[in-house]
Image (cartoon, rainbow, N blue to C red):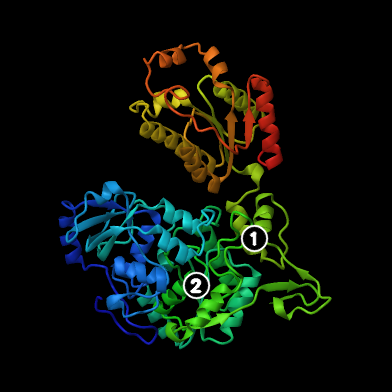
Amino acid sequence: MSAGLIPPHGGTLVNRIASSAKAEELRAKAADLPKITLSAKQACDLEMIAIGAFSPLTGFVKKADFESICRDMRLAGSGGGTVWPIPITLAVDDAVKATLKTGSQAALHHADGTLLAVMDVEEIYPHDKKLEISNVFRTEDEAHPGVKSVVDEGDWLVGGPVHVITVTPEKEPGEQFTEFRLPPAATRDAFTQRGWRTVAAFQTRNPIHRAHEYLCKCAQEICDGLLIHPLVGETKPGDIPADVRMKCYEVLIEKYFVPERTLLSVMPAAMRYAGPREAILHALVRKNYGCTHFIVGRDHAGPGNDSKGKPFYGPYDAQALMKKHAGELDITMVPFQNMVYVEDRAQYIPEDEVKEGQNVLNISGTEFRRRLQEGLDIPDWFSYPAVVDELRKTHPPRHRQGFTVFFTGLSGSGKSTIANALMVKLMELGGRRVTLLDGDVVRKHLSSELGFTREHRDINILRIGFVASEITKNGGIAICAPIAPYVQTRRQVAEMIRPLGGYLEIHVATPLEVCEQRDRKGLYAKARAGIIKEFTGISDPYDVPQSPDMSIDTQIISPDNAAHRIIVKLESMGFVR
């Protein structure tokens, strides 16, 4: 562990950020080291280690710690059995693992190419995903975003301390929140300067509505100060982006909190959605930031329901686990029941205090997002108008959002013909720019260097998906008409676009024999003769979509009627009027 300091708030902080001289030495050395490009979650973890937020960790965990954390929620060996609930790992795939050597070092880079750190590679060991998933998340359901994240990670883990050059990538979009990005040492100093001996931390990854405000103000009644500490690292698709949330927090604090007793800072961690275990992690992190109390409400860090519609965690599982380890955490939990609005009293109260006959009003998170998307009224008792106004600036109703219509089907199935008919109808409706990304045209202008191996096909489809995501994000309409034969790649495209706007997958399900009969270019005949290799439907597979948003067989419906059906579908979804 690096030398740290012990201020009035919290324990010893680890500092892994190199001095200027050391950083220059590391940069020179990194040029000859194997390279590991970090995922968004890994980059968040590196920053949390670097600034001491994950103290006592000095790097990514090694095998003994990994297994002990998963099984017993404790660090092993030098950690002395300290409570630690979630392993902070660096997963790599086979290709990267082959470049690494135990006892050597590796250079850690951001996805934009920025050199962030040099790591001592002390161990390389198999990623026991089953051990991690079953213990940390208590489910193997891939509908859980934390489970899905681990499943998709590499099969090897690299353990060892890190020597951090910078935590700021060169090309990061404007979500750095420099003014509010206070490391633990800075928040501790701020508490001391303000004379706060007791500080309650409020963890959030969502906008603060009036029920949350009630929790915060109750905590302020028992503590000198309140740290509103939103998580701004990687979250799951569908969560409100961090830059939008920050505007809401600033408006709320300015209008409805006492500034002298409230501090806003951000935590650059990634969400795991691990429920009870993540509540423990969030508490330990806030202790490192100097807090003495930690607010834990209903279903802390829960991701909602599983694939069968049942909650992943009980509403108060996190509070129960916090109570179990209360004697070791050195931070006091401030527990709250589910808060509900009682119309008769015109105020929020704990659910267990509601009396028979009182009228309780409630809006679920799903219902709130629906009202936001469709431009419907959101009552003042649920959220302040100033907060809703900020959200509406970046979350317009669906008829003003961008969207993508993604066609998939065999060559000759009629994708391009329907796509062109749809483009004409959407342009006639007006209101948005419409861009057609036809498979052949994209191949010519965007992917001319690619062949037709599976790897190259995937690259081509992901390029189309990226362009479509940018069009969607900026309020336009993207119509994509590639073959897109592989289900996994189509899923990646959908995951890329859905958080940004609408997404509609259309399977043009014209049978193979009909496609062959229409083959004006003679491609199928050449494929049958072996002249064209790896041709979809003949010598290369086509993964038939199992649950597309719409399926169209051009044997029984004309292109114009097909385009009309799609327009009707988009109308029912609220994307066109």
Image quadrant assignment for residue 69: bottom left
In space, the residues marked 2 and 1 are separated at their CA atoms by: 20 Å
Task: Name the spot of residue 512 as percent of width and height, x first.
Answer: 54, 20
Q: Is residue 174 visible?
A: no
Q: Is residue 30 above or below residue 274?
A: above
Whether pointer 2 and pointer 1 mark residues with C-beta atoms closer than 8 Å, the reply is no
- The residue mark sitting in front, 2 or 1, is 2
In this figure, which residue is indicated by the disc labeled 1? 365
> Which three-letter amino acid code belongs to the residue tagged 2?
Ala
Labels 2 and 1: the sequence-earlier one: 2
In this figure, which residue is indicated by the disc labeled 2? 279
Q: Nearer the viewer, residue 308 or 438?
A: 308
> Which three-letter amino acid code belongs to the residue tagged 1?
Gly
Q: Which of 39 and 21 is in front in this view?
A: 39
Q: Is residue 290 visible?
A: yes
Q: Is residue 173 above or below residue 12?
A: above
Quadrant containing the N terminus in the rendered view: bottom left
Q: Nearer the viewer, residue 279 or 289?
A: 279
Secondary structure under tag 2 reads: helix
Secondary structure under tag 1 reads: helix
Side (left or right) of 516 relative to 151: right
Task: Name the spot of residue 50 as percent of width and height, x first.
Answer: 31, 68
Q: Nearer the viewer, residue 332 or 373?
A: 332
Image quadrant assignment for residue 351: bottom right
Give neighbour class at mark 2: few <14, some 14-19, many 20+ (Cα, 10 Å).
many
Residue furthest to the right: 357
Question: Which numbered circle lies on residue 298?
Answer: none
